[in-house]
Amino acid sequence: MSYFRPSVDAMTGYQPGEQPAPGVKVIKLNTNENPYPPSEAALQVLRGFDGELLRRYPHPMADSFRDAASQVLGVPHDWILAGNGSDDILNLLVRACTEGDRKIVYPTPTYVLYETLAEIQDTKVVEVPYNDDYNLPVEQLIEANGAITFIASPNSPSGTLVPLDVLSKLASHLSGVLAIDEAYVDFADYSALELVKEHNNVIVLRTFSKGYSLAGLRLGFGVANPELLSGLIKVKDSYNVDAVACAVGAAAIADQAHKNASAERVKASRAKLTADLTQLGFKVGPSQANFVLAQAPNNKAGALYQALKERGILVRYFKQPRLDDKLRITVGTEEQNQALISALTELLA
Ligand SMILES: *Cc1c(COP(=O)(O)O)cnc(C)c1O
């Protein structure tokens, strides 16, 4: 006799990338955090935060954050739903839209949390494999017609971006929700945000964890028409964004100059890292995100992952078909990337 539902007993649970204890000296290139500090304007809001605001409950819809986001994005504030990270919005979508045969559909490989959320909800999943060039398998996704179709664009772990006309075609043929997960959009050439105005069934998800260097704050949001958001609002925790995240996030999104400058640095380093890895014999796909997916020479990915870890350099290794010959490496500072390249040079010698 178990305490848990059979579906919970059967699942393994999401495995986050390792998070070393504070103060432990590692080069952390495994969970796609931004290597540069957050906006100084956002940090000032944090330092000056009024304790009185912690005594009270926060605004249920994080309104001051929504107002700031609305200014930057050019959408009305009731088209924005803030969450405790974009994972919160993913969770709300799954709980509000799916159960049993109301299935979840996504191309693979992709963000593993989609599968975990489906397992928790006891929802059927249809996984459609990407081909080796990571072109979106549109026809099969349309055919599967999920209650939700999740597309990460840029995708993790491939770093690939889906063209807007392809996403638009997909949206027009689906009767369910198309959730476009733009966690990495700050490092990409374009966004799908405009599609929320053209398609009632599209929601675009954003996070502060990557581009804004605020993974520890836990703030993300979804953009969609108010009718699509209404079902998610019924399901959410009454106070799903805390007062600190609301205030700091408002200042962070207002400081686009800081975010854009840090994204430019990451993109320049991404190009250099790609070139250096290629020089060492890795096959590196083009990336629109703050990481690269690199196929290791001589099928050595697993061994290199271990050996790097022993040297205090963490990268991500997925022990699964199609990925177990590759490493997903977050773009770090120039110094961190150089340390990685030096270590790999020694290990491959
Ligand atoms: C990092 C990531 C998220 C999670 O973002 P949080 O806002 O930190 O919850 C969502 N989707 C993808 C594809 C990610 O890589």
Image (tube, rainbow, N blue to C red):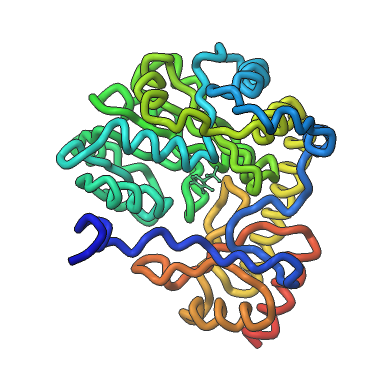
Q: Is residue 31 above or below residue 179?
A: below
The part of the image, by quadrant, that contains residue 61 is: top right
Horizontal side, residue 200 vs residue 293: left or right: left
Q: Residue at x 57, y 70 (%)?
A: 282
In this view, which residue lies farthest toward the top? 76
Horizontal side, residue 215 vs residue 47: left or right: left
In front: 15, or 174?
A: 15
Horizontal and vertical percent position of residue 63: 60, 19
Q: Is residue 25 above or below residue 159?
A: below
Q: Residue at x 77, y 50 (%)?
A: 36
Q: Is residue 317 above or below residue 86?
A: below
The part of the image, by quadrant, that contains residue 70 is: top right
Q: Residue at x 38, y 26 (%)?
A: 232
Q: Residue at x 55, y 76 (%)?
A: 305
Horizontal and vertical percent position of residue 248: 72, 33
Horizontal and vertical percent position of residue 104: 27, 41
Classify the position of the N terminus by image quarter.
Answer: bottom left
Classify the position of the C terminus by image quarter.
Answer: bottom right
Horizontal side, residue 194 vs residue 99: left or right: right
